[in-house]
Structures are given as structure tokens and as C-alpha cells.
Image: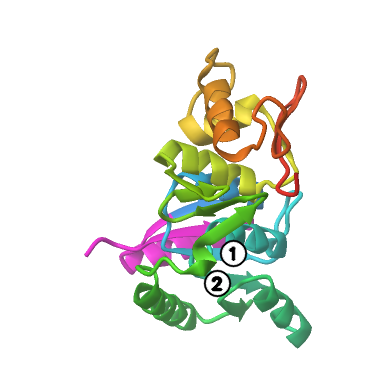
Amino acid sequence: MSAAHLLLVEDEQHIAAALCFNLRQEGYQVQQVDSGEEALQRLSHETFDLVILDRMLAGELDGLQVCQRIRRIEPQLPILLLTALGEEAQRIAGLAAGADDYLAKPFSLTELLLRIAGMLRRSAWYRPQYNELSRYRFGDAEVNLISGEACRAGQPFQLTDLELRMLKLFISHEGEILSRAFLLKSVWGMAPDTETRTLDNFIVRLRKYFEKKPARPRHFLTVRGRGYRFNPEG
């Protein structure tokens, strides 16, 4: 069995370094990022088995906001929230945002490892099932964010891996303007200054799939000179 792949979202470098070391000693594969924005970018094009998410993060998104956005694109992905805020109200807020478990700092390394092992074990019981929580709906469309199966106006179709990756990136950044450079780097790993029509072709495909009138889009919007924005409400 391959080692579980963990994403650690922690901006305090001394804590991040210690956690990465100890988790790798336990045999886990670990990737660490400093911000919620970078975490969402990684999740849009890589598969993880569990996310360890700090409640207080530098950047525009805090841990609760990141947790909520992860839940939109990865309904079954286990999330363990770490925080220095141990009050009951804060724990409830974290669980309400979609976290599966909550651990207050300072914490015991042994307890952390036991909780991670337990969450991974439980997630394995349910992950093979594509249930209703895996589905995202907008307009008259519905998408299974795990399998890529989709339908609009009752007509089924299958998204490719790259199409699903781009859609999940838009969903995780709902309402935000995403630059061409950001999309090229996040979906294809291309340099921001790459001259290519690949992105434009994929936008055309998403509009063809999900818009009632692709020539007059209501969901996948062009923001002239800045990039694209996803509006699920239309």
C-alpha cells in the first residue's frame, strides 16, 4: 500500500518543519504550503488523502475560509484543523466550516499522529462511494467532482482530467478574478508569460458544456484585461 499523501497548510516555519519531519518519519508523504491560496491551488491539480490546516494563516484567506472552499471541491477529503484558539466557540466554528477534527495548540505529537491515523482509516471506509456529497450543482448543471461525470439540461457527458481540474479551480475561487497567468500555472504548470491558446480553448469548452448560450456566458465570465471569473449563480 502506498504512503498516504498529506497536505500541511502552516505558515509558522518552525512548526511546519517539525511537523513535516515527524510525519515523514511515520512514513507519510507530506507537502507543505504557507497560505490558503497556495493550498487551494495544489488541491486543484494534485490528489491528497488528508489536509492538516492551520486556523490562523497569513494572506487573504484564513483557515475557516479555506476549509469551506475545500469542502466545495473535495467533499470527502479529511481535514484536521490546528489552532491556538481552543475555546468551545472556535471549535464549533471549525467543525461548522467542514473540518472533520480539531486540535488546539500546543498539542501532543502522539495525539496528532493517532488522530491522523484514525481519520485516514475512517476515510478509506467511505471514499470509494460516489455519494451525493461529491456532486456540485450550478445553473442547470451537475458535476461529480470525483469521477468527472456531468450533465446539463439532462444531457450527460464526461469531463477530462484537465477540464475537471480547471472547473475545480474555478469552484474553489468562486467569484474571484483568476488571471491567465494563475490559470496557466495552476492547471498546466506553464510559465505565466507563455503565449498559448490552450487556456482560451478550455474556456470555450467549459462554456459549451455548461452555458445555455455559450456566446453569452453567465457562469464563466471574461473580465477584460484581467482574466476570468466563475459565477455559479449566473
Rendered image quadrant of residue 224:
top right
Type of amino acid under label 1 = Leu
User: Mark 2 falls on what kind of element?
Assistant: strand
User: What span is colored magenta in the figure?
Assistant: 1-30
Q: Is residue 115 above or below residue 171?
A: below
Q: Nearer the viewer, residue 71 or 210?
A: 210
Residue 125 picture quarter: bottom left
Position above or below: 139 against 64: above
Residue under label 2: 80
Q: Residue at x 48, y 83 (%)?
A: 111
Q: Are marks 1 and 2 in contact (CB under 8 Å)?
A: yes
Q: Is residue 64 above or below residue 108?
A: above
Residue at coordinates 53% horizontally, 60% vertically from top-left?
135
Q: Would residue 186 be seen by someone viewing this image from the given angle? A: yes
Q: Which amino acid, mark 2?
A: Leu
Q: Residue 32, how many percent across, how many down? A: 51, 53
Quadrant that contains the N terminus: bottom left
Q: CA distance from mark 1 to mark 2?
A: 6 Å
Which is more toward the observer, 8 or 228? 228
- Disc 1 crowd rating (10 Å Cα; few below 14, some 14-19, many 20+) is many
Q: Position of residue 92 (x, y in %)?
A: 71, 82
